[in-house]
């Protein structure tokens, strides 16, 4: 029996040993590093448009039992261009296998991501290195998996989790968006989550610490190398969907916030908040420690008294159309500050500040400053103020008194070296008004009084590159002041402001300078129920300059403004603002756009409409502008635009030009007329109308088209951008950047779409025009823009190829890719070979013109579709044409010699047509030449046939009068670009004496004319 038991035991032991051996072999084969790495890389390739690389991998079961350990070393993710987006030294996970086998619960004992770095960069053109990283198919598959099955599996996983320990150690994150000008960097980031989860909910402790956070926007630092941290305890009950958190501490740059409360998550997506928060400052010392060392070193070393309190709460429901109520309080009471070794101190410091914000508008929202007091050591500041009814009819009330000698601040505070403060500030002001008072122009209801003065102010903060220098800045304001010139004998509100030599510099490239400033204002007493209060104001500004980095520049040699508010005579309750502005030597630059003006005299009037729109007052402008020495340049249309003297009158109806002479590159335009309905067109999407007389001595169409081409190229051509940036602030320095003349028309040729909300009519007279290699003179015509179409009527001009052209034409873009053109032209004494060079499109309309030389008179009516590049759509081409001419060459020399020899011409060398009159039509890609009579040598011929747009033809010529005793015909076939064939046949045309089918041409022209009108009206 013992032997049997022993055998069974040995047999079982052998089986177990084999199983263990098999498991060991399986683990070492299946979880071999190369297998794991290959599997992960293959799996990632199905989701990423990039690559993932892993240096080493390891899975441990037996050596770490009861834990299953998994580790990846040196994990790197690159995009398709090979740029590293994500890297980490190590990812390790340890799962308790025993707990899973016993309780079917996943217990993650440890999850660690060590030293990860994440980089997100966007270049100046807006191209992000993360863009396109994930494949579209992967996104779709993930989206499908996130349905009900995904939710069920998520719930199952949530229920099975027992405990977790999640850590991210020494992480770094870089976000650099050069396109938007935003930058953020986090270094030394540690994240720790400890806790557990089960069927009833979850709970634990969370902490986040960042060694350094730097953030800036458009070059301005919002945060610079600041420490930040978050610690909190939280718990979540799944049945009630309540999340409670306590002992929450948020640290940012030495400022500590605390908070506690609860959030209830509703089924409909709403959240009920009950949160208390505060600033964790228990004394003035902690508040002073927030002052940077580059301002006051060891600012927290002062001897202080007083208490500091900061608290607030968020209570209410957040959902669609509903917001919680926000309240906050901050106060400093019975405070004082004294630094060791300093001769003076702040003896009295008081502050009481609070706010409430109710976006539901059930309670008044406000910001209040009940008290501010700072006294001691040559400083005496007291004040208070309120903003009430913030979300309804905001109103402002304030009272401030200040008597400060900045130089005496050195007796109180131990400022860092390099800081320079001096000057004297004296202020005693009180004011009260509402936003409604301002918007309605009822300035008589503004209550204000007091004075302020600044003498020899100088503030220099080297670390922030801030420098403020003001030699003198004074002002005073008062209510109910005596004024003998006023009908009531007093002014309800009156004041003035003056300044000398103001210079402000900041590190973001901002600079402001003005040598003198004088401003004044006064109002009449409060209006009664029948009249608006009047107000007068004025300002004189001397030399002034404003810079903002390389983005903005504004400058003027002198600026004078006289303005006022008065009632409209016919409606005394309606206010009208009137202003007279005189500017001298104005210069401006915004990015790459430049503007210059030698002189400007502007009369401006703004009248408020009696009715409001959507609760807002609407003001209607009117006035006149007289400009001299106007210059402008913009990359959106890179030609220099200038005007020596221009007068513009504008009102609600539109704009009127009084002999405005503009120079656009090499071209000049003189405008006389009006643009009407401009207000309704801009703000009510109505039709803008205009009737203008346009006169030009020279219009260089080549340069204007080339400028249109360069405008599109500017967005992608870095070299062109660099040239514009190097040209500086002066508009005159852009002359070398102006689009030059060119005869290359293809660069600017494409369909242009005409808005339907334009109804414009131009009576044009252009003395000289350059179009491609053609010079046009005495161009006259009426140009009408209506219903998205451009129509030319009463067209008349001469050029180097045609003695005179008259007629009409229409252009319309049905879409961005499909256009229409129709025209009816009379061309007198046209040089055939020159007109084809000038208008290559005629070669498509009438290919037979290539074989003619000489002068002809042409009547042409045609219509055609246009593609996106304004090329003729041959299948849609339809036209009728009548040609008359004398002494024309019909055929090439070789073909003529053969025919002349066969027909026994007297002059076998002279291939001249004595006279010809021919009618032809184009339809369905075919040119039909109707039978016509021509005289050549001692023959009278009748000809007709078909010519195709591929230059092949099939003609018949009948001999009506010739030395031959009988009538005979000749069939000619072939291609204008190749060898022609001919043969003797019977005469088809025996009785004609002139060109036939003129009625057909007239009918075709009539139909085209009707189509043009329909396109124009529709």
Image (cartoon, helix red, strand yellow):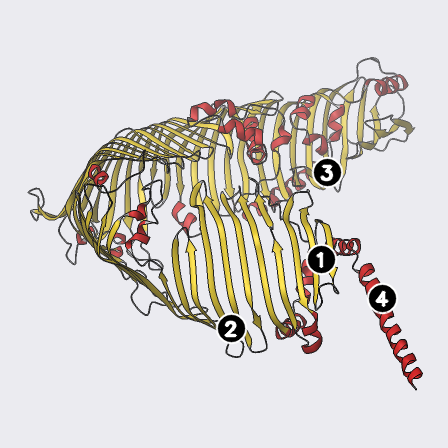
Front in this rendered view, residue 829 or 687: 687
Is 690 placed left or right of 619 in the picture?
right
Which residue in the protein does label 3 denote? 922
Task: Say whether disc 4 or disc 2 marks the residue closer to the N-terminus.
Answer: 4
Q: Percent position (x, y) of residue 502? A: 27, 33
Neighbor class of circle 3 (other Cα within 10 Å; few <14, some 14-19, many 20+) is many
The answer to whether mark 3 and mark 2 are in CB contact below 8 A is: no
User: Which residue appears at 28% of the width and 46% of the height?
Assistant: 606
Q: Earlier in the sequence, mark 3 or mark 1?
A: 1
Image depth: mark 1 or mark 2 in front: 2
- Looking at this view, is 405 or 28 the one in front? 28
Q: What separation in Å lies between label 4 and label 2 (alpha carbons)?
A: 45 Å
Cα distance, mark 1 to mark 4?
42 Å
Inspect this view and state whether residue 120 appears: yes
Mark pair 1, 2: CA separation = 36 Å
Query: Which structural element holds mark 2?
Result: strand
User: Of discs 1 and 4, which sits in the foreground?
Assistant: 4
Kindly indicate the quadrant of the structure image that contains residue 25: bottom right
Disc 3, disc 4: CB below 8 Å? no
Tell me the residue that label 2 is attached to: 236
Mark 4 or mark 1, which is nearer the start of the sequence? 4
Identify the residue under disc 4: 21
Where does residue 524 sit, x and y in percent of width and height?
14, 48
Res 137 label: 1
- Depicted 622 relative to depicted 718: above or below: below
Secondary structure at numbered mark 3: strand
**Measured Cα–Cα span from mark 3 to mark 1:** 52 Å
Please tell me whether mark 3 or mark 1 is closer to you in this view. Answer: 1
Residue 830 versus residue 284 in the image, above or below: above
């Amino acid at each position: 029996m013992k032997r049997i038991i022993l055998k069974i035991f040995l047999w079982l032991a052998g089986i177990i040993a084999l199983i263990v051996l098999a498991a060991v072999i399986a683990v070492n084969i299946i979880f071999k590093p190369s297998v794991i790495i290959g599997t992960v890389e293959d799996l990632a390739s199905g989701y990423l448009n990039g690559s993932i690389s892993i240096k080493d991998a390891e899975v441990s079961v037996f050596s770490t039992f009861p834990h299953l350990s998994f580790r990846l070393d040196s994990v790197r993710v690159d995009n398709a261009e090979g740029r590293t987006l994500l890297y980490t030294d190590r990812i390790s996970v340890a799962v308790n296998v025993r707990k899973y086998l016993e309780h079917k619960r996943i217990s993650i004992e440890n999850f660690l991501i060590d030293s990860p770095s994440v980089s997100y960069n966007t270049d100046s053109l807006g191209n992000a290195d993360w863009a396109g990283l994930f494949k579209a198919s992967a996104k779709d598959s993930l989206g499908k998996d996130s349905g009900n099955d995904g939710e069920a599996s998520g719930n199952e996983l949530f229920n099975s989790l027992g405990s977790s320990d999640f850590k991210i150690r020494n992480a770094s994150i870089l976000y650099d968006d050069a396109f938007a000008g935003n930058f953020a960097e986090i270094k030394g980031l540690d994240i720790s989550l400890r806790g557990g989860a089960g069927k009833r909910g979850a709970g634990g402790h969370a902490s986040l610490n960042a060694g350094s956070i730097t953030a800036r926007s458009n070059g301005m630092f919002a945060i610079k190398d600041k420490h930040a941290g978050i610690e909190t305890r939280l718990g979540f009950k799944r049945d009630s969907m309540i999340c409670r958190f306590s002992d929450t501490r948020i640290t940012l740059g030495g400022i500590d916030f605390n908070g506690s409360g609860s959030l209830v998550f509703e089924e409909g997506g709403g959240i009920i908040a009950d949160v208390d928060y505060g600033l964790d400052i228990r004394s003035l010392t902690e508040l002073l420690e927030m002052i940077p060392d580059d301002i006051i070193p060891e600012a927290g070393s002062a001897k202080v008294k007083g208490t500091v309190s900061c608290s607030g709460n968020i209570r209410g429901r957040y959902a669609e159309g509903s917001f919680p109520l926000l309240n906050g309080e901050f106060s400093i009471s019975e405070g004082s500050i004294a630094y060791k070794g300093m001769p003076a101190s702040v003896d009295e410091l008081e502050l009481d500040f609070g706010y409430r914000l109710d976006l539901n508008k059930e309670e008044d929202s406000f910001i209040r400053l009940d008290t501010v007091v700072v006294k001691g050591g040559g400083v005496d500041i007291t004040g208070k103020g309120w903003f009430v009814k913030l979300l309804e009819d905001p109103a402002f009330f304030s009272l401030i008194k200040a008597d400060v000698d900045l130089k005496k601040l050195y007796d109180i505070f131990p400022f860092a070296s390099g800081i320079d403060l001096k000057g004297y500030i004296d202020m005693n002001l009180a004011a009260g008004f509402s936003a409604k008072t301002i918007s309605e122009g009822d300035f008589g209801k503004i209550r204000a009084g007091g004075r302020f003065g600044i003498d020899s102010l100088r503030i220099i903060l080297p670390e922030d590159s801030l420098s403020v220098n003001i030699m003198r800045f004074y002002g005073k304001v008062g209510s109910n002041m005596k004024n003998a010139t006023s009908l009531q004998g007093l002014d309800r509100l009156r004041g003035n402001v003056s300044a000398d030599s103001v210079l402000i510099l900041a590190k973001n490239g901002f600079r402001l300078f003005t040598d003198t400033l004088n401003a004044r204002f006064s109002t009449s007493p409060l209006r009664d129920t029948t009249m608006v209060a009047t107000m007068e104001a004025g300002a004189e500004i001397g030399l002034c300059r404003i810079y903002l980095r390389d983005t903005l520049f504004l400058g003027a040699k002198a600026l004078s403004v006289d303005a006022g508010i008065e009632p409209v005579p016919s409606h005394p309750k309606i206010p009208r603002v009137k202003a007279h502005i005189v500017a001298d030597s104005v210069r401006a630059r915004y990015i790459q756009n430049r503007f210059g003006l030698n002189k400007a005299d502007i009369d401006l009037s703004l009248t408020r409409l009696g009715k409001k729109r959507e609760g807002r007052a609407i003001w209607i402008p009117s006035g006149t502008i007289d400009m001299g020495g106007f210059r402008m340049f913009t990359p959106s249309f890179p030609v220099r635009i200038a005007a020596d003297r221009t007068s513009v009158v504008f009102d609600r109806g539109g704009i009127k030009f009084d002999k405005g002479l503009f120079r656009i590159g090499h071209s000049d335009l003189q405008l006389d007329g009006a643009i009407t309905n401009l207000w309704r067109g801009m703000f009510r999407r109505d039709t803008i109308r205009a009737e203008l007389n346009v006169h030009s001595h020279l219009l260089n169409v080549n340069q204007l088209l080339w400028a249109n081409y360069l405008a599109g190229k500017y967005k992608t051509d870095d070299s062109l951008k660099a040239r514009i940036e190097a040209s500086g602030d002066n508009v005159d320095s852009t002359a070398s950047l102006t689009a030059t003349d060119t005869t290359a028309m293809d660069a600017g040729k494409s369909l242009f779409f005409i808005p339907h909300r334009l109804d414009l009519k131009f009576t044009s007279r252009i003395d000289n025009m350059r179009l491609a290699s053609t010079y046009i003179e005495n161009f006259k015509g009426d140009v009408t823009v209506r219903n998205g179409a451009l129509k030319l009527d009463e067209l008349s001009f001469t050029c180097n190829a045609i003695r005179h052209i008259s007629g009409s034409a229409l252009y319309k873009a049905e879409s961005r890719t499909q256009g229409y053109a129709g025209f009816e032209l009379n061309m007198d004494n046209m040089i055939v070979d020159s007109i084809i060079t000038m208008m290559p499109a005629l070669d498509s309309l009438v290919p037979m013109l290539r074989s003619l030389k000489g002068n002809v008179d042409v009547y042409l009516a045609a219509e055609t579709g246009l593609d996106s590049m304004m090329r003729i759509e041959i299948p849609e081409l339809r036209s009728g044409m009548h040609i008359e001419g004398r002494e024309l060459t019909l055929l090439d020399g070789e073909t003529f010699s053969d025919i002349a020899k066969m027909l026994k011409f007297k002059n076998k060398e002279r291939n001249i047509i004595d006279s010809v009159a021919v009618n032809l039509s184009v339809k369905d890609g075919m040119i039909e030449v109707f039978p016509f009579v021509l005289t050549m040598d001692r023959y009278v011929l009748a000809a007709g046939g078909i010519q195709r747009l591929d230059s092949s033809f099939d003609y018949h010529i009948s001999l009506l009068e010739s030395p031959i005793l009988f009538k005979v015909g000749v069939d000619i076939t072939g291609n204008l670009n190749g060898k022609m064939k001919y043969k003797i046949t019977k005469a088809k045309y025996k009785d004609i004496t002139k060109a036939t089918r003129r009625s057909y041409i007239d009918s075709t022209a009539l139909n085209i004319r009707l189509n043009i009108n329909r396109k124009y009206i529709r």
